[in-house]
Amino acid sequence: MRRLYYFPIDTLDKIQGKRHQYVPPRGSIYTGSPANAKAYIEQGKQQLTLLKNHINLKPTDTVLDIGSGIGRTAIALTEYLEPEGHYKGFDVVQLGVDWCNSKIGKDFSNFEFKYVPLFNDLYNTSALKAEEFVFPYDKSCFDKIFSFSVFTHMQINEIQNYFKEIYRVLKTDGLAFSTFFLYDDENENHISTENKFKFPIKKNGYRLMNEDVKSGNIAIHKTTLNTMLDRENLQLVTIVDGYWKDHSNYSKDSSYQDVVVFKKL
């Protein structure tokens, strides 16, 4: 249905030469808002800016992209990472992985995308569970690990397992960057009843947007997040609040979701 809906404008983009070799047609973009090639590339560049600003991403780093999607961040990194640097990404949607390998991976030998068939309420009905998943990478092999809008669509026990795996594959002096929906005691009422983007379902240390779709959207109390990180010997470095709950935090280089940076203890 998505492809059919966007088929007319995708066809027009192709006729007018507005397509980009690495950017999928709008009908194939399943994360975020479908965008034309120019806007899609700009979104990826904005994510790259966040990574450079918050975890000092370097052109020679070996990086892991958790939830690589259909290449939004990877496209920007093709122009930033040097041949000595390496990009590895995995995703639960085979469409995105196949697209990235056939387009980006074909032209950049230091870029690799893996499909992992994990169960998710939104994207995949596989029997393999995220809370049991072992990242397909060796111990202590990444300088930087990042994820955009992944932990906003996972359950608490699944996120906990991912923290454990991040600890295992991150180098001792490495840094991890992830985006979340976070709240504290002061703004819990606001994000549950007043905010345009609401989380009305209260749980123990977190809130859901929809009781029936556990992986739809999740907001986590900052204290709960700290406890989860501590459990896996990870240390919180910083939290930078996004503008999803307070538009006064908006700037052209800010993140809609809350940015969390952490490292090994």
Image (cartoon, grey):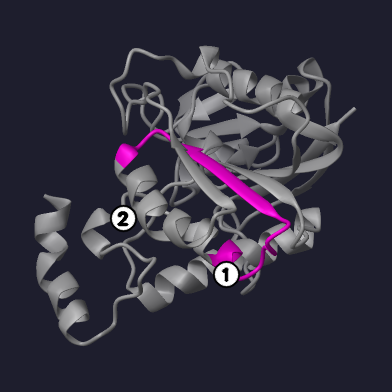
Residue 249 appears in the rendering: no
Q: Does residue 162 appear left or right of residue 262 in this picture?
A: left
Q: Earlier in the sequence, mark 2 or mark 1?
A: 2
Q: Does residue 139 appear left or right of residue 77 in this picture?
A: right
The C terminus lies in which quarter of the figure?
top right
The label on residue 45 is 1
For the point 74% across and 23% down, which residue is it? 168
The crowd level at tag 2 (other Cα within 10 Å; few <14, some 14-19, many 20+) is many
For the point 83% across and 36% down, which residue is it? 263
Q: Viewer-proximal residue, 159 or 143?
A: 143
Q: Quadrant of residue 232?
A: top right
Q: Which residue is mark 2?
A: 29
Amino acid identity at mark 1: Lys
Instruction: Tell me residue 228's x, y (percent).
Output: 72, 21
Q: Secondary structure at mark 2?
A: loop
Q: Quadrant of residue 206?
A: top right
Q: Viewer-proximal residue, 79 or 227?
A: 79
Separation (CA) of disc 2 from disc 1: 17 Å
Q: Quadrant of residue 179?
A: top right
Instruction: Tell me residue 242's x, y (percent).
Output: 63, 55
Instruction: Tell me residue 215's x, y (percent).
Output: 41, 28
Residue range of the region highlighted in magenta in the rendering: 76-94
In this rendering, the answer to whether 11 lies above or below 117 is: below
Q: Residue furthest bottom?
A: 16
